[in-house]
């Protein structure tokens, strides 16, 4: 069983195969988005009021502590922590841009990429530098 946690408050964000995150839109509109916890599966569920247009960035936040999960130099990635079935910890990064299918699972020893746009980042090493 995998667990997905907030990097800040460590809240468990997964339930029944989905990861629940908070999306904030302009003018005080916000809501919950459900993402598949299977990496590389880009099916997502949310109310149409908070859905982004193709190419638009969404502001992903933790539903527990409300902190922004947007991460990295370009403010285009969302960061979560994952613990897998054997207890190994990983950093998960995925694009906050609607339609951009790139997901990274970064572990101490290796990096896995998912999604058809993942290769556009040639050197992902900088994600680990804080
Ligand atoms: Zn949190």
Image: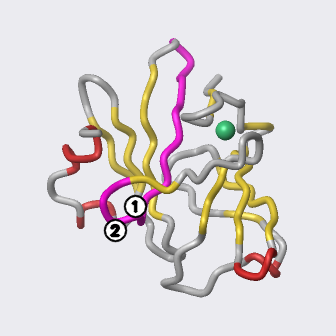
- In this rendering, the answer to whether 112 lies above or below 103 is above
- In this rendering, the answer to whether 86 lies above or below 50 is above
Q: Label 1's element?
A: loop
Q: Label 2's element?
A: loop
Residue at image location 48% in from the left, 46% down from the top: 79
Residue 84 is one of the magenta-drawn residues: yes
Residue 12 locus on image (x, y percent): 71, 30
Q: CA distance from mark 1 to mark 2?
A: 5 Å
Mark 1 C-beta to ligand 1 under 8 Å: no
Residue 66 locus on image (x, y percent): 71, 49
Q: Quadrant of residue 117?
A: bottom left
Instruction: Name the residue furthest top.
Output: 86
Residue extent of the magenta highlight? 72-86
Disc 2 crowd, CA 10 A, few/some/many (<14, 14-19, 20+): some
Which quadrant does the N terminus fall into?
A: top right
Residue at image location 58% in from the left, 45% down from the top: 38
Residue 112 is one of the magenta-drawn residues: no
Of 111 and 68, the residue lying toward us: 68
> Left or right: 102 with respect to 57?
left
Residue at image location 33% in from the left, 66% down from the top: 74
Q: Which of the numbered marks, if any, corresponds to residue 122?
A: none
Which quadrant contains ligand 1? Answer: top right
Which quadrant does the C terminus fall into?
A: top left
Q: Which of the numbered marks, if any, corresponds to residue 102?
A: 1
Disc 1 crowd, CA 10 A, few/some/many (<14, 14-19, 20+): many
> Left or right: 94 with respect to 7?
left
Residue at image location 62% in from the left, 59% down from the top: 60
**What residue would you read off at disc 2?**
117
Please report contact status of discs 1 and 2: CB closer than 8 Å, yes or no. yes
Residue 54 locus on image (x, y percent): 54, 86
């Amino acid at each position: 069983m995998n667990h997905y946690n907030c990097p800040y408050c460590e809240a468990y964000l997964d339930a029944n195969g989905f990861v629940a995150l908070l999306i904030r839109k302009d003018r005080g509109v916000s809501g919950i988005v459900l993402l598949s916890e299977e990496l590389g599966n880009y099916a997502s569920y949310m109310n149409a009021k908070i859905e982004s247009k193709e190419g638009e960035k969404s502001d992903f936040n933790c539903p527990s502590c409300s902190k922004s999960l947007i991460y990295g130099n370009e403010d285009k990635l969302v960061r979560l922590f994952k613990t897998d079935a054997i207890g190994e910890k990983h950093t998960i990064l995925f694009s906050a841009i609607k339609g951009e299918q790139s997901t990274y699972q970064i572990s101490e020893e290796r990096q896995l990429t998912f999604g058809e746009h993942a290769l556009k980042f040639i050197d992902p090493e900088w994600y680990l530098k804080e």
